[in-house]
Amino acid sequence: MTLLDQQIRERFAAAQRIAVISHIRPDGDAIGSVLGLGTALQEAGKDVQFVLADGISAVYRFLKNAGLAQKEISGEIDLAVVVDCSDLERTGGVLGERQPEMNIDHHVTNLHYAQVNLVEDSAATAEIIAKHLPQWGLPFSRETAEALLTGILTDTIGFRTSNVSAETLHTAASLMEHGIDMPDIYHRVLVERTYEAVRLWGRGIDKLQRMDSILWGVLTAEDRKAAAYPGKDDAELISLLSSVRDADVAVLFIEQDAQHVKVSWRARPGFDVSRAALHFGGGGHAPAAGATIEGTLEEVIPRVLDETKQVIEQKKTG
Ligand code: AMP
Ligand code: MN
Ligand code: MN
């Protein structure tokens, strides 16, 4: 066992009231990591708080303990574990000034903000948890396996991202061996969509533009209204954009309100869009990154496209 695993094991053993926390606008990896690890701790007899500032969307409610998710920490806790967050701002401020004891994450941009930092270059945070959990002296139930497999499936878009390794597949296979119906989860979280989501795509697709090898698009508040789309996210339109041949980088601008724009980047292997995201106070991975930027669409779009051009230049100059 590594020293880090030993430390984590001891911290879990010593704590009773544990908060497992992840990021705002949670994706399947944030949710799967919180529910997977949190459920294992709960089954070990701990008092667990499953903390997600924006709650859990309907798609993921089939996972055990999804109904227990809370938007903030309540009362005293002995231990705070933050998962799938490169920085503490991503938690939506649920910790206030409190430094978390533990940070488990797979982002290259992670700031090592906790007392114990388990940061590894894996395809998903859920993959890190699945690999290390047996060392931490916690039960590994079917329900934990189901949540962790959901995290791996969603962050790899169904094992399609360039960071998927043989080890990722081995880990996924061992999770399936807990009796998990992987194709069923795959369908629920990656294939099925609402009518409104596809209508929103239509609005975005209609406005796509190309600039050199950058493909970019915009979703406005008006688009959401016209499509009757309830969220403020992109309904995964960015994944579709990243499938367009000949585009090295895809960028999507999602208007949040009059003064904030969420930007998502996706890039082919060899390009590093996390640098552009970091420049604007966001973060992520070389092939997938994001940031929320202050300003109107008119202000933000040219600034981001300029910075994104540099990502392409950097690759050309090595
Ligand atoms: P998204 O475009 O939101 O799907 O995000 C792509 C990747 O970038 C994911 O790994 C996110 O965790 C990360 N990311 C997105 N937004 C931010 C942000 N504001 N700060 C740090 N990382 C982010
Ligand atoms: Mn995430
Ligand atoms: Mn992740």
Image (spheres, rainbow, N blue to C red):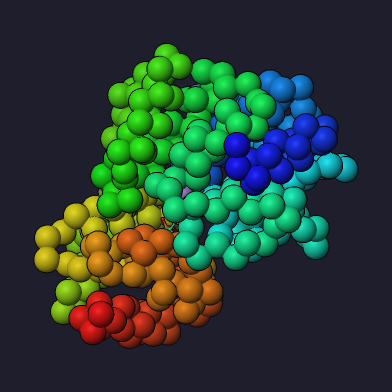
Give how far across and how far down residue 285 sits, in percent: 41, 61
In this rendered view, identify the residue nearer to me: 94 or 198. Answer: 94
Give how far across and how far down residue 9 sits, in percent: 70, 36
Q: State the residue at coordinates (31%, 29%).
A: 187
The single residue placed furthest to the left in the displayed view is 246
In this rendered view, identify the residue nearer to me: 56 or 126. Answer: 126
Q: Is residue 191 left or right of residue 52?
A: left
Give how far across and how far down residue 183 sits, in percent: 30, 24
22 over 139 or under it: above or below: below
Residue 49 visible in image? no
Give the quadrant of residue 192: top left
Q: State the residue at coordinates (36%, 38%).
A: 168
224 over 270 or under it: above or below: above
Q: Is residue 35 left or right of residue 253?
A: right
Give the quadrant of residue 87: bottom right
The single residue placed furthest to the top in the displayed view is 179
Which quadrant: the N terminus? top right
Q: State the residue at coordinates (68%, 21%).
A: 43
